[in-house]
Amino acid sequence: MLQTIEIYRESGKRRRTSYRAVRGRQQAEGKTPGQALDSLEKLLSAEEKTANSLIVLQRFQPDAFFSKSQQTRLQKLMTRFHEAINTDATISPDERAELEQLVNAEWIAAIARASAMIAQTDQELKS
């Protein structure tokens, strides 16, 4: 089964930027996306380390595929979701449904973004 690892940029105390890598209920932090991913890998079992993973690095830059308002709302809901996990709480069913819808929309946007990059690369190679 394919596991997804998401890497989020966070603004911490004293305006320092850090990154959080999330795989299911496992989380790790680092100063860079790579450090966060390496820290997360240390938490994984040997079996989990050999499973196929897809890594998604959230840059949160608005574009034609995912708007600023969608990104703002997704960030807010993800923050609430992670706070809930850390405190063994839950988010409301409505928030969870909205979060799932936004995550799906971001996946669709990521696929469209990748397709656009491939098309642009193909065009450049033909020129």
Image (tube, helix red, strand yellow):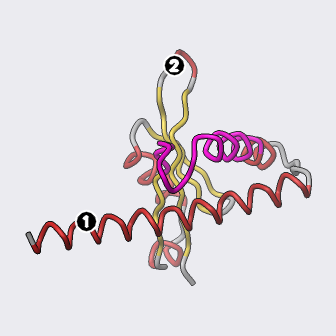
Q: Is residue 33 magenta?
A: no
Give coordinates of residue 49: x percent, y percent: 47, 72
In this image, 39 relative to 25: left or right?
left
Q: Viewer-proximal residue, 81 or 120?
A: 120
Q: Tell whether label 1 touches label 2 (CB within 8 Å).
A: no
Residue plotted at (82% across, 43% down): 87
Q: Viewer-proximal residue, 46 or 65?
A: 65
Q: Amino acid at mark 2?
A: Arg
Of badges 2 and 1, the one in the foreground is 1
Residue plotted at (71% across, 39% down): 76
Give coordinates of residue 14: x percent, y percent: 53, 15
Span shown in magenta: 58-80
In this image, 124 relative to 94: left or right?
left
In the picture, the disc for residue 120 is 1
> On screen, 13 above or below 21?
above
Residue plotted at (46% across, 45% down): 59
- Residue linked to disc 2: 15
Q: Secondary structure at mark 2?
A: helix
User: Which quarter of the rendering shows the N terminus?
Assistant: bottom right
Residue plotted at (28% across, 71% down): 119
Q: Amino acid at mark 1?
A: Gln
Distance of label 2 from label 1 (alpha carbons): 36 Å
Number of marks: 2
Give coordinates of residue 42: x percent, y percent: 48, 57
